[in-house]
Amino acid sequence: MLKIWGRRSAFNVQKVMWLIGELGLPHKHTEAGGAAGGLDDPAFLAMNPNGKVPVIDNDGTIVWESHSILRYLAAITGDTAFWADDPAARSEADRWMDWSQTSLQPAFLTGIFWGYFRTPEAQRDWPTIREKQKLTCQCLVRLDEALDGRDFLGGSQFGLADIPAGTNLYRLFGMDLDWPAVPRVAAWYERLKERPAYREHVMIPFQDLKGRTRF
């Protein structure tokens, strides 16, 4: 059975759990990191020497790094919605996954969610927060443009391209900050919220994390 380690509220773990839910994969989930601890245990470090989650063990195959796990799970299941036979189609999903990791996630998750939401008000670095908010807005506009004429980032069908970027939206739209008018992104978000796996694994309340830099 597929085994996964990581706390359910961790952003990168949510990406993987969302795909596991979409694929309907039997799995065993073990809480790790945060209040659960365990990341510095020798047994865990033997799987991932970086001491970070998520990590999976699929019958002895250990994979870490969330996007590597997403690609691995999509590939082994052979579901063409997530792992297209056409390399060009796969490359489009890859591009959005990489863009999410290198552009959207540093701007929003690191800059806003951590720098603003999880940092106590007296400790916030407002010039950096405003800069990250500007970059996040640019990312939202780029997503809105990409969704012109499309229901999902990869086209008419939900796929791997939607997961990394889409995981951000629940937290982004649940915060008390101003964002640009992005009607296509808003409609995309509504479609994602209709998916049971998104509701179960991504739409996890996070208000208890406000102003908390530690668990």
Image: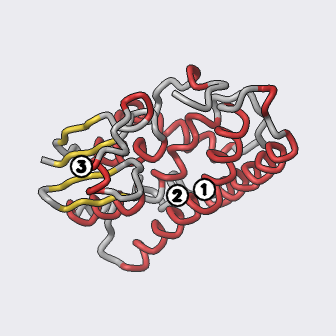
State the image coordinates of residue 41 (x, y, percent, origin top left).
Answer: 30, 44
Which mark is nearer the camera, 1 or 3? 3
Quickly name the residue at label 3. 43
Mark 2 and mark 1 lie on one chain; the one further toward the N terminus is: 1
Asked if one can make out residue 180 in the rendered structure from this viewpoint, the answer is yes
The secondary structure type at the circle numbered 3 is helix
Q: Amino acid at mark 3?
A: Ala
Quickly name the residue at label 1. 147
Quickly name the residue at label 2. 153
Extreme residue in the top direction: 208
**Disc ID at residue 122:** none
The secondary structure type at the circle numbered 2 is loop
User: Is 199 or 64 nearer to us in this picture?
Assistant: 64
State the image coordinates of residue 21 (x, y, percent, origin top left).
Answer: 29, 41
Picture quadrant where residue 182 is located: top right
Q: CA distance from mark 2 to mark 1?
A: 6 Å
Q: CA distance from mark 3 to mark 2?
A: 38 Å
